[in-house]
Image: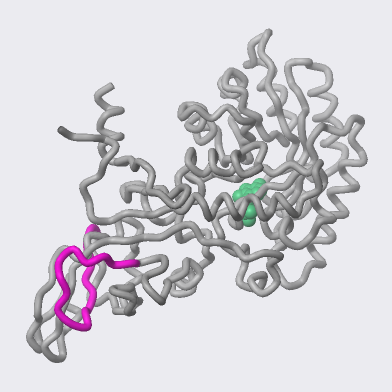
Amino acid sequence: MMNEEQFYRDTWVEVNLDHIRDNVAQMKSLLPGDVEMMAVVKANAYGHGDVQVAKTALEAGASSLAVAFLDEALALRQKGIDAPILVLGATNPSYVQIAAEHQITLTIFQEDWVREAKEVLGKDATVSVHLKLDTGMGRIGIRDKETLLKIEGLLGEDPRFQLDGVFTHFATADSGDLSYFQEQLSKFKSMISALKTKPRMIHASNSAASLREPAAFFNGIRFGIAMYGLSPSVEMKEALPFSLKEAFSLRTKLIHVKKLLPGETVSYGATYEAQEEEWIGTLPIGYADGWIRKLQGNVVLVNGMRVPIVGRICMDQCMIKLPCELTVGTVVTLIGQDQNDAIAIDEVASWLDTINYEIPCLISSRVPRIYVKAGKKMAVSNPILKLLDKKKA
Ligand SMILES: *Cc1c(COP(=O)(O)O)cnc(C)c1O
């Protein structure tokens, strides 16, 4: 019998929900009682699993959720989440009715959007919206008071639109120099002071700002990267108000072990050549899993030892050089703790010359996620068989 709640491959991600709970609770304990935490679970909760992280964060003290686009919000509704959800990015106004039906809050920042949405929204429907102000991020948002007041006016004359929030996003909250951050903060305060009516929720801070600048709390924070136990930047690591607990590990198992003779080669292009008799192990993970080709030459952990990835990384497999003959089935850690050593996400990010945010997002959906909660492994799901089942239905 095939079971979609099980998977049959030797590669998996372990997500420690206890660590996520602790990160949320620690941050929450630093917030005054009237400051709400919105847990940012966009991009499948930064690759960790949207519904599991959302539930954990809500249990640990978050009061609402934020995602990047409407489909992500609908996916959470489909999975039974009924907490408030804010879509942080732009939503095409033609979908306003769908948002209204599922009680999803939209971000708006254009006059035309409001005009078009008014045409589409059912006459008895209501939709909650937050206004986005661009105070210096230069991405989306209202840039001047005049437009802000026009949009407030357009919304005010139509009771179907509930203006529940106003927010902005910082471009440099994680950097050493906070002067640009302070400029954005002043601009935000000045713009919201122009509003005729203050919406219920005013929020500006991402993880970086939340961890270092209580002056920017207003009455809500949007907590993302730090919830997953990752520092918003390398610079900030030294000055965190509490220690973050990383939640994401990536593991696989040796599926083949062989001895190479001097001169024999490994993988496409035959670029790696054994210099002496060498033990080579094969791992069932490759670039289609997000373990990208650029990682060739970096290391993984086997029995607590660092060993190199040799030869080109293939779509579904890659090879490592072993210190000795090891048995098929031995667990190999690509990210996370193994005995007395650990490969942190920050280390993988440094190999790839990128930021930690990108690493768990990169590990593709075909790698199953296992959840650890209250120290115990929870039921897992098979991403591939789930997809097949949806097709049949
Ligand atoms: C992603 C995002 C966040 C969360 O940022 P972190 O740095 O992960 O805490 C907050 N606000 C907006 C608008 C975002 O897009």
Where residue 199 sits: x, y (%)? Answer: 83, 32
Extreme bottom residue here? 276
Q: Quadrant of the C terminus?
A: top left
Quadrant of the drawing holding the N terminus: top left
Is residue 390 in view? Answer: yes
Scheme of colours in the image: one colour
Is residue 363 located in the magenta-colored stretch of the structure?
A: no
Q: Name, please, the residue furthest toward the top.
A: 124
Which residue is at a point 16% across and 84% down the rendered structure image? 273
In the image, residue 166 lies at what x, y percent?
A: 78, 38
Image vertical order of residue 86 relative to residue 244, above or below: above
Task: Give the quadrant of residue 389.
Answer: top left
Residue plotted at (56% across, 59% down): 229
Check if residue 329 falls in the magenta segment: yes
Q: Nearer the viewer, residue 341 or 79?
A: 341
| In the foreground, 230 or 100 | 230
